[in-house]
Amino acid sequence: MGRNPRYDVLFEPVRIGPVTARNRFYAVPHASGMTNAMPRMRAAFRETKAEGGWGVVCTGYVSIDPGSDDTPLPYATLWDEDDIRSHALMTEAVHRHGALAGIELWHGGGAVTNRLNRTPSMSPSGTAWMPTHVSYMGNQRPRVMDEQDIRELLEMQRRAAARARSAGFDIVYVYAGMGYLPHEFLLSEWNHRTDAYGGCIGNRVRIVRELLEVTREAVAGRCAVALRISLEELRARPSDNAASEAHEVVQLLADLPDLWDVKMDSETTDCAPSRFTPEGSHEPVIAFVKSITGKPVVGVGRFTSPDAMVGQVRRGVLDLIGGARPSIADPFLPRKIDDGREDEIRECIGCNICISSWHECVPVRCTQNPTIGEEWRRQWHPERVPPAQSASAVLVVGGGPAGLECALTLGRRGYEVMLAEAEEELGGRLRFETRLPGLATWSRVLDWRRSQLQRLNNVTVYRGNRLEAGQILELQPAHVVLATGARWVPLLYTPLEVPAGTLDTPGVYTPDDVAAGVPMEDPVVVFDFDNYYMGSALAEHLARGGHNVSYVTPSGLASAWGVMTNEQPQVYRALAAAGVRLHTLARVESFTAGKLTLTHVFTAARAQLPCRALVIVGARLPNDALYQALMARREELPAAGIAAVTRIGDALAPGAIAHAVHSGHRYAREMDAGDGGRILRRDAPLRTVER
Ligand code: ADP
Ligand code: SF4
């Protein structure tokens, strides 16, 4: 099967200064959670994207100096010669597949707190970036940069750019975005300077110009010089000389960089969740750039559809299709389009579990792609699986994310698989969750697996089959995998976080009851200490369905964990729009006769809310009845030829969909592998100079 000529334009080479990208697929810099302490993992993770056809593959943010220290968040370093080898591992890996390697050199300025380094950070006028935001809070404010600091910053960039060249990079960045140091110079609220670097926009842009110039000198014609810039605020500001300050900045720098990489200002708008923001959301902010510069422009928009990509090029919005999340969910996206297999693309669902990994300071995880970050340490390739090692038949019980991923991967390996699902429809928890406000895109988890399964004639799917222990013994599979999911329970906790037992009074419900369409009387209270999406999504769903809804949480914020996935700001807007009343730092004490008694988490002050239906969104327990029934007949298993019964996904440990997919994939990969096949290699830093 060949490429559809409609997509030919995506495979045209693009000249970027002295180098040429083989096509328009550009894996932009993004947080990977992999520091210099994980050089092999990092190289393999990026090599996979190059192998998958991306024309350019970039690093995440790479600090140019110990004074730009984002600890505990996982950032890379290029501080001295010692750091070069670790990056060279990546450039060599990316070059093996004909892709270019880009490096995002970074100074955090007033957005970092130098916790590790213990020296004050610096910013143009001493103001911190986002000091009211909990994850950026530090007790020390940045110092004001003097002229010497500016000279040193330019030297830091120059030296780092020269090291980047030695490490083999083809594209070297100046990063003036996301509140980091050069971006702070661009915005007048952060920059109150009265010298040549402050005041009019021509002065505020000076530092960016000089950073570009020193970078160009350092790479000495061998590498392209890219500018990554956030345009959201600047675009909203009027200018005397242009349509906006953003227009003026682009006019002033125009053809100075070899490439413009344009983005939004904050994580929540730059990497917005699909729950609230559609594909291509950056376009209104960034579309003007190409009309001013003659240099190529790259931008992102969670693009997964090749038609949308072609549209961006044809309409003159972008020259290069930037991918961060789409390149995580499917590192082989370009290759699949090239082969005419675009229906095989594992499309990003926009859940932002990937970005949550960075916030949690661990290597990137993905709901759709369980192999991401596992390329080196578990030797998992996204497209290749080891062949089956036996003729064993496997029965997978449960067609949710875990069971589907497990059956698919076992099937790809060549095993005979039976997948039994109790309901007529596959999908498990997705059957209901994708009907919640904003979560329809998540059905891609099911759609992709279902369509891939249809291609395998060694996997038989039985729907409407609720299996019991006796039937499984009769079926006599060699292996039984239980992916029977989990259920919500109306469990409460004491103020000391000790489980206080379940609340089994009439009028108490769980999300499973809402999923089953159980009727509820108003007023409804959703009590959420799960803290992820379910509580707020249910509150919005019930309110939109006409209910009078309040949302209560013991946390300080609604959907507290949603800060990890960039959902939280929009959760607030969605709940406000749906008319849901919020009560934070409150715990359910009792519920009787239409009245809910709450206690304040810190003061123990009591409050009462009218309530006829209390939906508790807190604990989940595995559906392990089938497992217990099989274990009760353990001695009959050998005679039935059953070698093992294994639980995966929520049936083992309730978690997010990403956990279930990873669990199902892992079982399938490790089947028949023996201990030697259960790889978890430990990475370690590389040093150029041993001391
Ligand atoms: P996970 O996230 O771990 O995949 P889900 O809750 O999404 O878990 O999916 C579990 C699936 O297992 C549900 O679709 C449910 O209908 C199915 N299931 C549970 N018990 C049985 C059973 N005894 N036989 C067949 N299917 C079952
Ligand atoms: Fe997309 Fe979610 Fe994977 Fe991130 S974790 S790449 S948002 S599917």
Image (cartoon, helix red, strand yellow):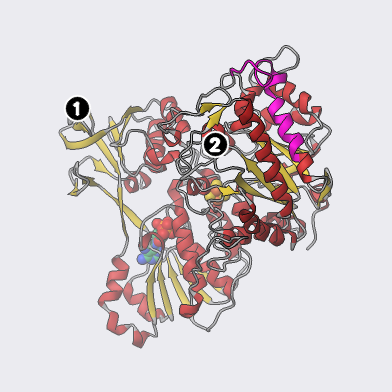
Kind of residue at disc 1: Gln
Q: CA distance from mark 2 to mark 1?
A: 37 Å
Q: Which residue is mark 1?
A: 608
Q: Position of residue 107 (x, y in %)?
A: 60, 38
Which of the image's four quarters has the C terminus? bottom right
Image side of residue 183 versus residue 555, left or right? right
Q: Which residue is mark 2?
A: 267
How packed mark 1 is, by other alpha carbons closer than 10 Å (few <14, some 14-19, many 20 or more), is some
Identify the element where label 2 is drawn. helix
| Residue 400 visible in this rendered orientation of the protein | no
| Magenta region | 192-215
Q: Nearer the viewer, residue 239 or 384?
A: 239
Residue at 61% in and 60% down: 689
Magenta span contains residue 209: yes
Identify the element where label 1 is drawn. strand
| Mark identifier at residue 3 | none
Image side of residue 600 versus residue 389, left or right? left
Kind of residue at disc 2: Glu
